[in-house]
Image (tube, grey):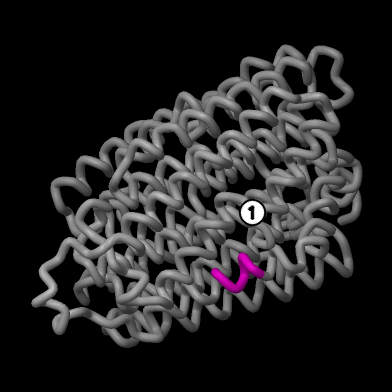
Amino acid sequence: MNCVALPILIPLVLMIMQIFFRRKIFSQWLGISGSLLLLLSTFYLFGQVTKHGILTLNVGGWPAPYGITLVIDYLSILMLVISAVIIFCISIYAVSFLKTTGEKQRFYIAFYALILGLNGAFITGDVFNLYVWFEVMLISSFVLITLGSSREQLSGGIKYLSLNLIGSLLFLAGIGLLFGKTGTLNMAQLAEILREDDSAILLNTSAMLFFVAFGIKAAIFPLFFWLPASYHTPNITITSLFAGLLTKVGVYTMIRFFTLFFVQDQPFWHNLLLTLAGLTMFIGGSAAIAQYEIRKILSYHIISQIGYMVMGLGIFTPLGLAGGIFFTLHNMIAKTNTFLVSGMVFKLKGNYHLKNIGGLVKESPLLAVLFIIPAFALAGVPPLSGFFAKFILIKAGFEDGHYFVTAVAVFTGLLTLYSMIKIWNEAFLKKSPEDPSHEKDKIKLSLLEVLPSILLGLISLGMGIFASSVFGYTMEAANQLINPSIYIETVLYNQ
């Protein structure tokens, strides 16, 4: 099962190649071809998981729990596949939307370092190694967010780094307490020990440290302030990458920890999760409708939609978890796409502020369609992916008696729809405030520039049309999370 290491090895090799071969054309095409190779490897691993079940690799031949263990189950592979799709699209988008040659060369090095940390977090079976991968992501994402070194970027980058360093400190403190109590950091062994330990409730201190650390990285209420302060500052290529991937790693780790080994005192944790999910949805959606800068609107909606993912974990039924995972996958695709479209709007109009742009439905009908698909997917309009993701969550909420947070989820969907309609009306329908005499100078979008958005739009549509198949895979992931005995058995004993 050495193929389990491919999601780590491929970006590591590509990062090294980018360091030593820094010619502009080489960097670009290596970025695209390398991302395609990563995507194909995740498809192969997906086939292996569906055929053989959970895949494991004990690095260096050291058996678990003594060595470094890599594990790919249904949740891991779904996150890997969707992330690889986004990475491939971003690598194409960067060719046209990164400005200078030097910026592109530095981008691809940090880009693959970020992917290395991201994939490592998805497949690690060890809590300390998860911390290491988080730090790899933090360092590379700070390099990316400050790429260009403008005053606004540095300000946003410092805010981003400061709060995330606090999260890392809390994470490390939680690891110390966890190891002191159990003597291990292997996730499967932790699950085996803590599920049979009558005093495991004493680990709530460690669990709370992890919860705050992951809450910062996921940007849940009230720990989200760094996100809208920083996500609008870098190049739109980088913002699109962050929007689709970074906060979802925080959600992924929260799901992993609070289904695998922090399963004591469930009424407290589930009520806390549902309360914060409702507040995250409502406050993020409410803040978004007050904005008039496209990137800020979309940034606040990243926050509100994190609430839906946490809601699925808080419900903690197979249907609720499946809905949360479905929503996460859908949101990664649709949210990335809306930011890609905003970058194309900026290229045509030179501005992100809704008051200063307009007339795009006539100027670029294709761009109008490319915006409508992810925008309506985020709002939950059928037959797009977001409708089915929200439907599953709402059904799970009503079935389990969580009426209030479910009502908040429905209301937040209306706030999202309002925000998307506002962008549509202001940027696309209303007349352009520009001088008509400049019409001849209008910029046209090339096929390479619109291709990533077309691909992501088709995936959003496909996830809606084939929702039953996607739901089947997310339900498999949810069942593995609810019943982790197969995970424990595979990692510890089937070596």
Side of 419 relative to 413 (left or right): left
Q: Secondary structure at mark 1?
A: helix
Side of 184 relative to 217 (left or right): right
Side of 370 relative to 85 (left or right): left
Q: Which residue is mark 1?
A: 386
Q: Quadrant of residue 250?
A: top right
Q: Nearer the viewer, residue 190 or 44?
A: 44
Residue in the picture at 53% in, 55% down:
118
Q: Position of residue 38 (x, y in %)?
A: 58, 74
Q: Quadrant of the C terminus?
A: bottom right
Residue in the picture at 72% in, 53% down:
388
Q: Is residue 340 above or below residue 426?
A: below
Look at the image and say whether residue 460 sits in the magenta stretch.
yes
Q: Is residue 32 above or below residue 246?
A: below
Q: Is residue 329 visible?
A: no
Side of 235 relative to 8 (left or right): left
Q: Is residue 394 above or below residue 240?
A: above
Q: What predominant SS class does the magenta segment belong to?
A: helix
Q: Is residue 5 above or below residue 168?
A: below
Q: Quadrant of the N terminus?
A: bottom right
- Label 1 environment density (alpha carbons within 10 Å; few <14, some 14–19, many ≥20): many
Q: Position of residue 237 (x, y in %)?
A: 35, 64
Q: Amino acid at mark 1?
A: Gly
Start-end of magenta stretch: 457-461
Q: Position of residue 222 (x, y in %)?
A: 46, 24
Look at the image and say whether residue 361 sits in the magenta stretch.
no
Residue in the picture at 69% in, 62% down:
383
Q: Nearer the viewer, residue 465 or 29?
A: 465
Q: Is residue 131 visible?
A: yes
